[in-house]
Image: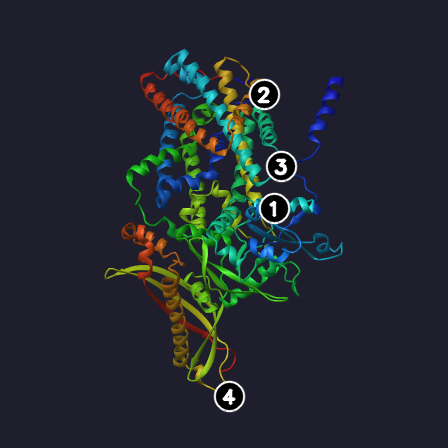
Amino acid sequence: MPRWRKISILLLSCILLTGCWDKVEIEQRAFVSAMGIDKFDPQEEQEKDGAEEETEPEQISRNRYIVTYRYPNTSVIAGKGEGEPVFKATSIGRTITDINSEVATKLGGNLFFGHLKLIVIGNSLAEDEQLMREVFDYIERNAMIGRKIHYMIASGKAKDLLEVKLARQPVAGLFVRDIIEQNMRTSQIADADIGYILRALHESRAAITPQLEGSEDELKVAGAAVLKDYKKIGWLGELETGAIMFMMDKVKNTEITVRVNELFIPVMIYNSRTAVKVEVRDGEIYAVFDIENEGELSQHLFELIGDTYEDEYLRDVAKAVSEKIKNQVEDTFIRSQKEFNADLIQINEELRKHEPDLWDEVRDNWEEVYPKVKVEANVETDIRRIGTTR
Amino acid sequence: MGSRNNDVILSSQFAAILSVTIIGVGILSLPRLVVEGAGPDNWILLLAASGAALFVGLVMAFVVKKFPGKTYLELTQTMFGKPIGTLITLGFSFYLVIFCAAEVRIFGEVTKQYLLFNTPLEVLSVTLLVLAVYLARSGIETIARMAEVIFPIATVIAILMVLPVLPELDVSYILPIIRTPFMDFVKAVPTIFFSYLGIEFILLYGSFVKDTKKVHKSVLLTVGLVTWFYLSVTWLTVSRFGLIETTHITWPALELFKTVDIPGAFLENIEAFIMAIWIFSVFMTLAVAYFGASLTLSQAIKSKEQNYLVLPLLPIIYFVAMIPDNIAQVTEFMDLYAFYMGTLYITIIPVALLIMSFFKKDKRGKKSA
């Protein structure tokens, strides 16, 4: 082999075998599982540590966010290391990117968002339109943040919720995922991931997000926040959230209790379909929800034989269930009009699709038209099973 | 022409080459362009554009069938005379160099954005280019075999990846039907038509096809497959993001896979897999265009061999690829380039060739082998 060839092989191996720019040792990578974003409130901060150090005036205008990260201790998960199963890091800064790099420097590693499960927004930030829009854009623009993650609004501060020490699951993000997946059964949790929220905000500038509450050692997803013009304008209770889920056809399992002949009868709905239609009758726009449910009667009264074996009785129960859902849906829809004027179900998109002529007329003043939309819910429920006694 | 007996392909291989060439970097931004152009009528727009592509494709197939075995240079020279023919062929080579550069640059941008954040753009581009050099030097038969291997693999994986998205397919987004103003629609057709960039290779590689009689079948197959692929990507994207958000995202087709959670959730972030397939397809597009650039150059300078011209083109492609400052400039430049150069080589020259071919007597040019 001629000498030049040997040399060139050596030189080439220098270039080709030196590895890769993007190599990251796994210990150096913080797999952020949950992220909490709060608004920085200068006054509050000053009160807290006012005595210890003087906050410079420049500092006050600079900081706008408080971001809290929660990431698992990978060596504990692998069963090799010891210590806290979950790490936390908090920092303040002007933009989220700012804080990311500051925290990354502090940790001596880098933050990886590919496995992010949860973003919690503090209540005060949720009410600030400018900051909310910045956060939404950050999420939408970031190539690593997926669209299946949960985006929730905290009842208080996001930071406090992420600092809750959970009794059961060590990784907060995963815990929330579990809770969401299990509670789909009750439908009173808003099934709303960031993909839906972004899309809904693009389409009607209104959306709902689940609400996250916390106590000493527990986190709870309950009810929903209403977003309008990119900021939070109010809360929905659990029943109303359930009604919204019915309207959006996102109900998988839920339980409805009705009162028939002085008896409380719980009915498990295990199958539900909703078709949304927009109709025009006598110059009025109607939003029509056709809901079909299938359910199972799961409790009646001991030693009261026969009733549940009669078709007519079951029909009565089913009717009561339908009536209840109908009322909830209609009331919630009217509340979304009167109180929030927020098109949570994207009726405007239905209008654009099915009544394009009418949509062309109302698109520019949809804000004024939406509260006048009439609602109609047609609910049909069939009770298919009654359990093992008659 | 090549002396290594490396210049015969079947019409089925021809179709495979064309398909992998047409599906390239454009697929990622296609849903955005279509929705911007025609909103809910995006599928009609796609069909109209594919109709236009089919038309020019068939025109080219007709020319190829009428003059079997004639190279691009021979074709243009017999039709327009020697100097003009040489000029057109040289221009085609130049056009393909820029085509390669654009492909390389967008490949680099996307890879940097989604996969390798710290690796310099230059390294990403050169790596892909060097690999393409290897394939482009090996000649048309090797390229054809490569296309035959990659096409089914990519198709199968793409279909598998799409399955989890299917349940959420919302066909109602095509409503209301045909409400786009006619003029807007017509204006949008050329933009989408250029998603079929690559179809001009029919004229260039037609001379290699053994069973020339079947060339029009290859064209039909290619346009059909590509259109089906484009339609499904657009529909999936639109039903996931809605019409408005689709127009906000730079590469909606890639973003689509960020919304996918495979049931069981042992796999996350499957857009990395989609990226892998997409890189295959970009690589093929690049290799085919690269080979075309060296081939037309060798024809124009009357060289017998094509492969020694491949390497010298690398720095040119590389530097052209590095000229734009950012992604916005790349897109702007691509639009202009596709509009002027693309129109010339995809529509004007084939149609001119067709018209001229009616005046020329069919003299059956001798096969060059």
CB within 8 Å, label 4 to label 2: no
Callout 2 amino acid: Leu
**Tag 4, which chain?**
A
Q: Which residue is mark 1?
A: A100
Q: Which residue is mark 2?
A: B311
Callout 4 amino acid: Glu
- The one nearer the camera, A71 or A91, is A91
CB within 8 Å, label 3 to label 1: no
Q: Do the residues marked 2 and 1 share a common chain?
A: no
CB within 8 Å, label 1 to label 4: no
* Secondary element at image label 2: helix
| Spatial separation of the CA atoms under disc 3 and disc 1 | 16 Å
- Sequence-wise, the earlier of marks 2 and 3 is 3
Image side of residue A148 versus residue B239, left or right: right
Residue B118: numbered disc: 3
Image side of residue A53 versus residue A97, left or right: right
- The one nearer the camera, B354 or A151, is A151
Q: Do the residues marked 1 and 4 share a common chain?
A: yes
Residue A384 % position (x, y): 45, 73
Residue A70 % position (x, y): 63, 54
Instruction: Residue A371: name its quadrant.
Output: bottom left
Q: Which residue is mark 4?
A: A303
Q: Nearer the viewer, mark 1 or mark 4?
A: 1
CB within 8 Å, label 4 to label 3: no
Q: Nearer the viewer, mark 2 or mark 3?
A: 3
| Spatial separation of the CA atoms under disc 2 and disc 1 | 43 Å
Callout 1 amino acid: Asn
